[in-house]
Image: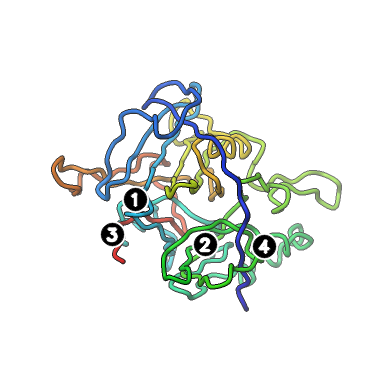
């Protein structure tokens, strides 16, 4: 099938942050305190929203670092997929079947479509989802692009929208709902009315849960964000989708997208273990957010040094 793609028009938003492992207060992510440096030079912060939501944030300068998706031949822990790709950090990615591990999201890597939800039989043969399939196929995705000068750019847009003239798609990862500039939980059929008139909330948008998200700011930074939920840390509850959208907005993201959450939420990092050089040792790698043992996932978003 042809992959039709496009740019989402977006507006600037305010920032949010707080001190490491402290109570929250409205500020900028640039005011976050006590960052821990990752092996690639990105900064990692952790803090609490109130008493029950433990937030983990990676801030990456896209002038120096690269974000890309990766997909395993089979499901695997986020830490394994990150280490197999020799990346500095990773967060779980798109949706997949728990039964057989098949991706329920579009995945494009190096210009090739590796996963198409039209091929997911558990999805397309589900009678409850049949009325919503066209909407599900059009859910938002992260697009990794090259402009006319061969410079990389990232955007978040619905799958059916078109690329800007002169841009080419190198990679993409579908997830959703889009969180910013507006939360599209209903528009992307994560919250939907069934034929019996009852509301279906397929990922518990209105309930507090573990969440994963990705966002980009207007000044060239990418944010990986994970919020622990029940079953991951004692005393944690997580956030609703709408609270997650608000968090991403206050962190300074102009565009943001929700990733697979709940039990799948996992963030893995390689801390810098050499104060003089940005290097890491095996014991400096850590799952900073996630279940133990880790949930196996199909796709991840990776952070690594630029090589172009």
3 and 4 marks in contact (CB < 8 Å): no
Which mark lies nearer to you, 4 or 2? 2
Q: Position of residue 249 (x, y in %)?
A: 55, 38
- Drawn side of residue 34 relative to residue 239, left or right: left
Residue nearer the viewer, 31 or 239: 31
Q: Position of residue 44 (x, y in %)?
A: 34, 39
User: Is residue 277 shown above or below 167?
Assistant: above
Question: Would you name the residue on which mark 4 appears?
Answer: 138
Q: Position of residue 290 (x, y in %)?
A: 42, 41
Which mark lies nearer to you, 2 or 1? 2
Question: Would you name the residue on which mark 2 appears?
Answer: 143
- Drawn side of residue 86 relative to residue 129, left or right: left
Which mark lies nearer to you, 2 or 3? 2
One can see residue 7 in this view: yes
Question: Would you name the residue on which mark 1 appears?
Answer: 89
Real-space CA distance between mark 4 and mark 2, rounded to the nearest whole angstrom: 14 Å
Real-space CA distance between mark 1 and mark 3, rounded to the nearest whole angstrom: 9 Å
Question: Would you name the residue on which mark 3 appears?
Answer: 86
One can see residue 264 in this view: no
Residue nearer the viewer, 277 or 185: 277
Dot 4 or dot 2: first in sequence order is: 4
Dot 1 or dot 4: first in sequence order is: 1
Dot 2 or dot 1: first in sequence order is: 1
């Amino acid at each position: 099938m042809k992959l039709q793609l496009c740019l989402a028009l977006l507006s600037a938003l305010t920032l949010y942050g707080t001190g490491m492992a402290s109570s929250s207060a409205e500020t900028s992510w640039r005011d976050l305190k006590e960052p821990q440096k990752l092996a690639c030079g990105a900064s990692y912060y952790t803090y609490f929203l109130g008493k029950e939501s433990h937030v983990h944030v990676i801030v990456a300068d896209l002038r120096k670092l690269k974000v890309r998706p990766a997909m395993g031949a089979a499901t695997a822990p986020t830490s394994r997929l990150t280490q197999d790709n020799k990346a500095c950090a990773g967060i779980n990615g798109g949706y997949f079947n728990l039964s057989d591990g098949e991706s329920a999201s579009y995945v494009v890597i190096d210009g090739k479509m590796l996963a198409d939800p039209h091929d997911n039989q558990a999805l397309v043969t589900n009678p409850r989802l049949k009325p919503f399939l066209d909407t599900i196929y059009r859910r938002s995705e992260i697009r990794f692009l090259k402009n006319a000068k061969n410079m990389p750019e990232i955007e978040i847009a619905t799958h059916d929208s078109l690329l800007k003239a002169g841009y080419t798609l190198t990679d993409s990862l579908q997830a959703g709902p889009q969180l910013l500039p507006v939360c599209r939980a209903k528009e992307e059929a994560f919250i939907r009315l069934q034929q019996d008139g009852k509301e279906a909330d397929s990922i518990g948008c209105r309930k507090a849960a573990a969440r994963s998200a990705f966002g980009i700011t207007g000044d060239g930074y990418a944010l990986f964000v994970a919020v622990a939920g029940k079953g991951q840390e004692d005393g944690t509850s997580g956030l609703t989708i709408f609270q997650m959208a608000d968090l991403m907005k206050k962190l300074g993201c102009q565009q943001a997208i929700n990733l697979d959450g709940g039990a799948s939420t996992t963030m893995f990092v390689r801390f810098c273990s050499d104060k003089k050089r940005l290097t890491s040792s095996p014991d400096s790698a850590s799952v900073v957010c996630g279940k133990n043992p880790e949930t196996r996932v199909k796709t991840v978003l990776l952070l690594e040094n630029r090589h172009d």
